[in-house]
């Protein structure tokens, strides 16, 4: 896949190169309101991009200024469960790396495997478990993109974690810290599966993020992962989940998440 072609295509349409990329997960599309002097480019018009079919994923690449700095914001992502290949899922991150972007902020919606991680909580990812049964780096390795066996010992930036702690303390924002486990979906997890995931050391479960993080680290980018708890897993109840519930709980955290990301961009 021609990441460089897409990178140059985008750079030709933007007033200046971005310093960071931000991927918005389910229910977090309203964070696009943060951007000033916004340029909207639908995914379908971008070479190499596919169509986002997940609920509440608008499918737009947005360029604009956040805290005075140029950033790209992905209003929706591509998921493995949509039938796309891993190469298609991580294509936007490969393009960012080809544009020499050094910082990636990844957000998602997740189910809680801990009773003290409540719907609406903001959880900063400290680690992850890849339970998707595949890896976006499978296949021939292009050494121009990254080394064959990239280390995953520090996949989430300790420096950005320190900045977030300062920002949260300054603005009295409650943060949780936890481990995210990624499954393929699209069926939600069973009670037995959730019990197993919790025993494996996971605090949250979802259907995204890990492939993008692996590829970003492969490219040498610094990564911040932020998850919004949108529902308790079936460890704690026997009710069916709905997309309405998930979107409503994601919206609870929007104002605080805007503040955290805006303040963080100033400091990186």
Image (tube, grey):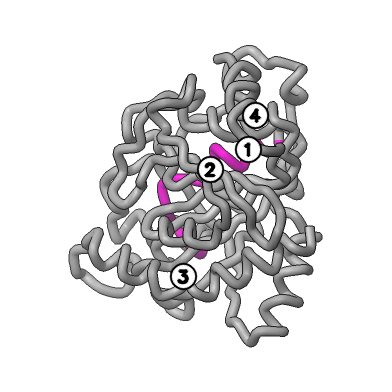
Q: Is residue 4 left or right of residue 184?
A: right
Residue 109 percent location from the top left of the image = 42, 59
Q: Residue at horizontal 64%, vertical 22%?
A: 8
Q: Secondary structure at mark 3?
A: helix
Q: Residue at horizontal 54%, vertical 47%?
A: 73
Earlier residue among tags 3 and 1:
1
Residue that mark 1 sits on = 214
Q: Nearer the viewer, mark 3 or mark 1?
A: 3
Residue 145 percent location from the top left of the image = 72, 23
In whole angstroms, how far apart are the C-alphas of marks 3 and 4? 29 Å
Q: Secondary structure at mark 1?
A: helix
Tell me where the magenta segment starts and ends, as one range.
203-217
Q: Is residue 125 left or right of residue 203?
A: right
User: What is the number of the mark on residue 11?
Assistant: 4
Q: Nearer the viewer, mark 3 or mark 2?
A: 3
- Circle 4 Cα neighbour tier, 10 Å, few/some/many (<14 / 14–19 / ≥20): some
In whole angstroms, how far apart are the C-alphas of marks 3 and 2? 27 Å
Residue that mark 3 sits on = 254
* Quadrant assignment for the C terminus: bottom right
**Residue 215 in the image: above or below residue 267:** above
Earlier residue among tags 3 and 4:
4
Q: Nearer the viewer, mark 4 or mark 1?
A: 4
Q: Are marks 2 and 4 in contact (CB under 8 Å)?
A: no
Earlier residue among tags 4 and 1:
4
């Amino acid at each position: 896949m021609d990441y460089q072609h897409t990178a140059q295509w985008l750079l030709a349409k933007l007033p200046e190169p971005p310093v960071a990329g931000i991927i918005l997960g389910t229910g977090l599309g309203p964070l696009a309101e943060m951007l000033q002097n916004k340029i909207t480019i639908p995914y379908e018009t971008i070479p190499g991009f596919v169509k986002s079919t997940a609920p509440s994923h608008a499918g737009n690449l947005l360029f604009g200024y956040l805290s005075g700095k140029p950033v790209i914001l992905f209003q929706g992502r591509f998921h493995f469960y949509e039938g796309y290949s891993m190469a298609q899922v991580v294509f936007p991150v490969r393009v960012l790396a080809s544009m020499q972007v050094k910082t990636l902020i990844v957000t998602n919606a997740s189910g809680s495997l801990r009773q003290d991680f409540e719907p609406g909580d903001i959880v900063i990812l400290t680690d992850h478990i890849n339970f998707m049964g595949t890896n976006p780096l499978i296949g021939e390795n292009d050494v121009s993109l990254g080394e064959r066996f990239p280390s995953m010992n520090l996949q989430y930036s300790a420096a950005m974690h320190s900045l977030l702690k300062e920002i949260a303390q300054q603005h009295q924002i409650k943060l949780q810290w936890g481990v995210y486990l990624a499954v393929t979906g699209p069926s939600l997890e069973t009670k037995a599966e959730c019990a197993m995931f919790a025993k494996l050391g996971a605090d949250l479960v979802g259907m995204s993020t890990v492939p993008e993080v692996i590829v970003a680290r492969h490219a040498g980018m610094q990564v911040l992962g932020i998850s919004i708890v949108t529902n308790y897993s079936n460890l704690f109840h026997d009710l069916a989940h709905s997309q309405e519930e998930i979107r409503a709980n994601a919206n609870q955290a929007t104002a605080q998440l805007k503040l955290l990301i805006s303040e963080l961009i100033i400091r990186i």
